Image (cartoon, helix red, strand yellow):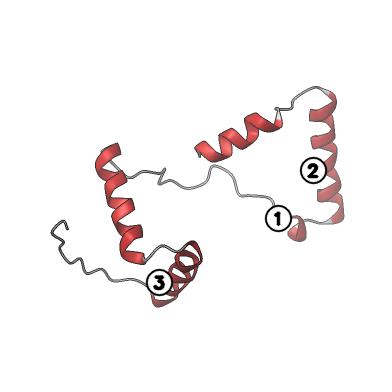
C-alpha cells in the first residue's frame, strides 16, 4: 500500500456537510475526492476547472415579469426560426466538456 500523509483544511461546516452528502451518494469518501482533485491539479498543471465569474447572470424565469418572460421566449423563437440552433448531441458534448 502506498504511503499517505495527512492534510488539514478549514471549511465552512455547511459546505462540508453538503459535499459529504453528495459524495456519499456517489460512494466516494471525501478523502478520495480530495485525492482525485489533487491528481487532476498535477496532471493538468493547474486547477482542473475554470475559476471565473460567470459572464452573464443566468435567467431565472420565476424572477421575470410576464412581459420579460415573453420577450425572452420571443427571442428564443426568433433564433430558432433563423436557424441559430445546435444539434442535441453537440450541446451535451459541450456540457460534458465544461
Q: Residue 22 location, x and y as percent?
A: 49, 66
Residue 72's mark? 2
Residue at image location 79% in from the left, 43% down from the top: 72
Q: Is residue 74 left or right of residue 1?
A: right
Marks 1/3 in contact by CB < 8 Å: the verdict is no
- SS state under label 3: helix
- SS state under label 2: helix
Q: Is residue 35 above or below residue 71?
A: below
Q: Residue 30 location, x and y as percent?
A: 35, 65
Residue 82's mark? none
Q: Is residue 12 above or below residue 92?
A: below
- The mark closer to the camera, 3 or 2, is 3
Residue with the most extreme bottom position: 13
Nearest to the observer: residue 85 or residue 31: 31
Residue 60's mark? 1
Per the model, the C-alpha gap separating discs 1 and 3 is 27 Å
- SS state under label 1: loop
Per the model, the C-alpha gap separating discs 3 and 2 is 37 Å
Q: Which residue is mark 3?
A: 16
Amino acid at each position: 500500500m502506498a504511503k499517505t500523509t495527512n492534510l488539514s483544511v478549514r471549511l465552512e461546516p455547511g459546505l462540508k456537510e453538503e459535499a459529504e452528502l453528495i459524495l456519499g451518494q456517489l460512494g466516494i469518501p471525501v478523502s478520495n475526492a480530495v485525492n482525485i482533485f489533487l491528481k487532476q491539479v498535477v496532471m493538468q498543471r493547474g486547477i482542473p476547472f475554470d475559476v471565473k465569474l460567470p459572464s452573464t447572470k443566468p435567467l431565472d424565469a420565476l424572477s421575470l415579469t410576464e412581459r420579460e418572460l415573453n420577450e425572452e421566449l420571443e427571442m428564443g423563437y426568433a433564433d430558432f426560426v433563423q436557424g441559430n440552433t445546435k444539434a442535441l448531441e453537440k450541446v451535451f458534448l459541450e456540457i460534458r466538456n465544461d
